[in-house]
Image (spheres, grey):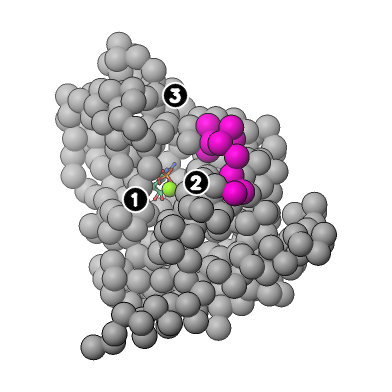
Amino acid sequence: MLNPFTIARRLRRIGLLGLNARNADYVLLYNQRRFYPRVDDKLQTKNLAIAAGLPVPALYAVVREEHEIAALHDKLAPYESFVVKPAHGSGGDGILVIHGRRGNRYRRAGGSLMSRGEFEHHLSNGLSGLYSLGGQPDHLLVEYCVKFDPVFEKVSYGGVPDVRIISFLGYPVMAMIRLPTRMSDGKANLHQGAIGVGIDIPTGLTRRGVWGTEPVEEHPDTENSIVGLAIPHWQELLLIAARSYELSGLGYVGVDIVLDRELGPLILELNARPGLSIQIANGQGLEPRLRAVQQLQRSGNLSADPIERVAFACSHFATT
Ligand SMILES: Nc1ncnc2c1ncn2[C@@H]1O[C@H](COP(=O)(O)OP(=O)(O)O)[C@@H](O)[C@H]1O
Ligand SMILES: [Mg+2]
């Protein structure tokens, strides 16, 4: 058994950032509260991204009132698949990924069918704030359901993988891809049971992965290797993450991007308090990378050009 001092020393050696340090040294210092609504409300984020010329999934409908729910069946009839999500949701809670219909019923990403009544009930719960930050009444977004890039066919189950990139002062410092599993029901959130796989910043190649607390090299449902995959459009993804700084005004932000087989990269959302498991997925700590950017800041060398920031990240943040 390792004693706690040995564990603490090892964690420090790889520069693992803990929850307290993330909050005190990064989130509080670099994220101004007045900008939080830009990322806490997914509708605002979508509108800001559109205004900045960044790609997002198309919005089909916004539901604000209970009485709008019944009309939705007809309104959504033209779309074979779609996604419903609470504007202030997090961790994949309350998200419905609908892949098709069977008669009057909706087929969920995990394969189960949902009656109209169950669908309406779910949306009504969503409006009441059941799935949202702080439990406040919320509004719901209905949007285009992303069709994943064929590269991911062998390593996802029932849903779209998403790429999470942490951007610090506009520098993409660390990245992972999250792969949905049978357990995660069409969502790529780690807490829903998705796998997190670290991505090497310069090359866009996947390295090691974790499922819960377990290291994994294969997808548990498809049994295909999750190591050595080349993420398509990688430089574009890094550039989107870099530009999320200007978009949000937040110094420390997690950017979630999905890859559509026809439309390419699309921004799903931004997070002002991104989780720390990205370090476990990469087997590396954030601290040294964040310090490298702080060093630029201290010496007055921060770049205002997202392309330059991506170039810096590619030459400094390889996963060893
Ligand atoms: N438009 C969409 N098309 C397909 N899958 C989606 C879509 N929106 C969300 N998802 C799935 O749900 C997950 C969580 O969505 P996200 O918008 O990031 O909300 P949350 O704040 O709950 O994490 C995504 O990682 C993705 O797997
Ligand atoms: Mg997310």
Q: Amino acid at mark 2?
A: Asn
Q: State the image coordinates of residue 60 (x, y, percent, origin top left).
A: 46, 27
Give the total number of marks visible in the rendering: 3
The magenta region covers: 29-39
Q: CA distance from mark 1 to mark 3?
A: 20 Å
Among numbered discs 2 and 1, the one appearing first in the sequence: 1
Q: Is residue 156 left or right of residue 286?
A: left
Q: CA distance from mark 2 to mark 1?
A: 16 Å
Find disc 1 in the rendering and name its residue. 187
* Secondary structure mainly formed by the magenta segment: helix
Q: Amino acid at mark 3?
A: Ala
Labelled pair 3, 2 in contact (Cβ < 8 Å): no
Which residue corresponds to the image point at 30% horizontal and 18% vertical from the top-left?
69
Q: Amino acid at mark 1?
A: Lys
In reply to whether residue 32 is colored magenta, the answer given is: yes
Q: Is residue 277 left or right of residue 129?
A: right
Does the rendering let one see residue 46? no
Residue 107, by quadrant, is top left
The disc at residue 216 is: none
Find disc 3 in the rendering and name its residue. 61
Quarter containing the C terminus: bottom right
Identify the secondary structure beneath mark 3.
strand
CB of residue at label 2: within 8 Å of ligand 2?
yes
In reply to whether residue 228 is colored magenta, the answer given is: no
The disc at residue 271 is: 2
CB of residue at label 1: within 8 Å of ligand 1?
yes
